Image (cartoon, grey):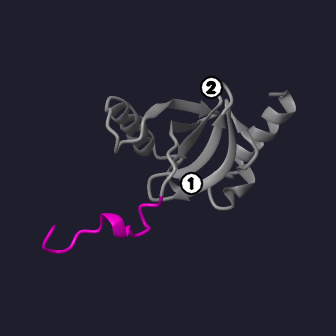
Amino acid sequence: MTSKENSTETRKFFRGQLQEGTEELIGDILSRFKVFGKLGSGGMDVAYTAQDTKFDGKVALRFLPKHLLCDEGAKTRLAHEAKAASALNHNNITTIHGIDKVKDQCFIYVEYTEGKSIKEPSKETSLSAREA
């Protein structure tokens, strides 16, 4: 990455572009990851799809949302979640590849898996009240 690209990346980070309006991150390189899409956001994180330029694989990046950036407890929980989940190996649990940092913003990079959003109803896995 050139110093000009690194400078642009840093400016975006400090302007809070990881929150609302984050589509502007698409195409940017954060550490060794080239961001190419936003997956979604929730109470604990904002998630993106990215290309790992070191290992040439697709990953998901999980960042703290804007309202938690200065919350040391949230940063600690994110690190603990990554550590705890990385010790697990199960088909229904996403593999944690690691934690990285750009300036003061930590993020987790995890296995990216194709599939439906958990918010989308799934008829093939629905249970009747009797089956439940």
What kind of secondary structure does the magenta stretch mostly adopt?
Answer: loop
x and y, in percent, of residue 67 in the image: 52, 56
Q: What is the secondary structure assignment of the residue under circle 2?
A: loop
Tell me the amino acid under the disc marked 1: Lys
Residue 66's mark? 1
Specify whether residue 118 is painted magenta.
Answer: yes
Considering every residue shown, the one lying at the far top of the view is 54
Residue at x 55%, y 58% (from the top left corner): 40
Would you name the residue on which mark 2 appears? 55
Please name whichever residue, 70 or 109, is drawn nearer the observer in this view of the structure: 109
Q: Which residue is rendered at x = 69% and y = 52% of the image?
A: 17
Quarter of the image containing the C terminus? bottom left
* Numbered badge on residue 23: none
Q: Does 130 lie within the magenta span?
A: yes
Q: CA distance from mark 1 to mark 2?
A: 29 Å
Three-letter code, disc 2: Phe
Q: Which residues are magenta?
A: 116-132
| Element at label 1 | helix
What is the quadrant of residue 5 in the picture? top right
